[in-house]
Image: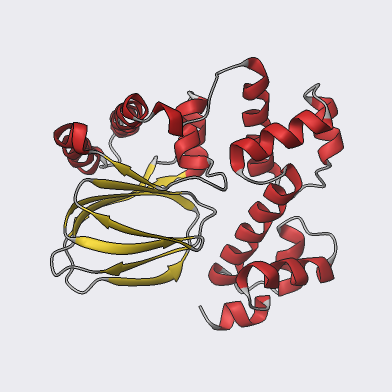
């Protein structure tokens, strides 16, 4: 199995500045000292000591140091492995689902010592050894459980069979985005109405099922543009777009660049 943790480290780089970027991992930043301006999908936050920031794999973000001392833990998580291992959909929601009014920053002051210990353990356990994933998963679950204990209102609500279906549909889209997915067909397959699916899905993710599907496809296309030499037309097809013109239009609306220019500016 792929390691849950892609990277984990402590950083105190002076004059740290990271331009707007994205990556296909969940990211956690725990600020220990100093301050920074973090922009996530256009929302600006000034973060400081005892702030914990959650960034999903679909969110563009930038970081600018505001204080001479900016000390933090940074952890990135492999999305499919985290989704598969973290069985509690409510805990997973804080990593995965950020609706329109979601606030990305949490105050960990009430459990600061425990949070620091957890991040230190994640770094220590991230060795690739036989039981490393189990140890890291236990750390992540403890951290998320502590955050939920102190901020229950900021997590997905009830753990009902109906909401389980919404999570399963989301995971299906994440896994099979490249296929010819029809939202109507998903409703029938999971025995829920189109209206209920659209309403609950948007409440959970901030996007309609169709918008979410397009968002996932565009994210995958952008990664292929950055990491492969495939022609744009082939990338569009691999990402699940059957119409090249629609792909170009959708891509430009999100990234403000044509795919070919996006690749050149990487």
Q: Nearer the viewer, residue 182 or 232?
A: 182
In the image, 236: left or right of 226? Answer: right
Residue 86: tell me if it is visible. no
Residue at image position (77%, 24%) is: 190
Residue 57: tell me if it is visible. yes
In the image, 195: left or right of 262? Answer: right
In the image, 216: left or right of 141? Answer: right
Specify the quadrant of the image occupied by residue 201. top right
Classify 68 as above or below 171: below
Residue 3 placed where, x, y %? 39, 41
Residue at image position (16%, 36%) is: 117
**In what quadrant of the picture does the N terminus appear?**
top left
Residue 90 placed where, x, y %? 49, 27
In the image, 217: left or right of 12? Answer: right
Residue 36 placed where, x, y %? 27, 63
Classify 158 as above or below 212: above
Q: Nearer the viewer, residue 100 or 161?
A: 100
Classify 83 as above or below 250: above
Q: Nearer the viewer, residue 111 or 187?
A: 111
Residue at image position (50%, 54%) is: 24
Specify the quadrant of the image occupied by residue 58. bottom right
Give the colour scheme of this rendering.
Answer: secondary structure
């Amino acid at each position: 199995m792929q390691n849950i943790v892609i990277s984990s480290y402590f950083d105190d780089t002076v004059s740290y500045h990271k331009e707007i970027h994205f990556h296909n991992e969940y990211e956690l930043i725990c600020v220990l000292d100093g301050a920074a301006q973090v922009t996530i999908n256009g929302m600006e936050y000034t973060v400081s000591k005892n702030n914990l920031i959650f960034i999903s794999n679909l969110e563009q973000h930038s970081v600018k140091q505001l204080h001479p001392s900016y000390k933090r833990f940074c952890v990135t998580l492999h999305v499919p492995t985290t989704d598969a291992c973290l069985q509690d959909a409510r805990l997973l929601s804080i990593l995965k689902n950020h609706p329109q009014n979601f606030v990305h920053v949490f105050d960990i002051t009430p459990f600061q010592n425990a949070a620091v210990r957890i991040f230190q353990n994640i770094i220590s356990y991230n060795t690739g050894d036989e039981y490393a994933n189990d140890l890291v998963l236990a750390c992540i679950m403890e951290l998320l459980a502590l955050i939920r204990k102190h901020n229950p209102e900021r997590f997905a609500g009830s753990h009902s069979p109906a909401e389980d279906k919404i999570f399963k549909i989301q995971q299906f889209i994440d896994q099979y985005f490249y296929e010819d997915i029809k939202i109507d067909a998903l409703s029938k397959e999971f025995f829920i109405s189109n209206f209920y699916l659209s309403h609950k899905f948007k409440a959970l993710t901030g996007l309609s099922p169709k918008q979410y599907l397009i968002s996932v496809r565009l994210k995958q296309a952008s990664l292929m543009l950055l990491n492969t030499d495939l022609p744009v037309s082939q990338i569009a097809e691999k990402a699940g777009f059957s119409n090249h013109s629609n792909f170009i239009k959708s891509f430009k609306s999100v990234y403000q660049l044509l795919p070919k220019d996006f690749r050149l500016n990487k």
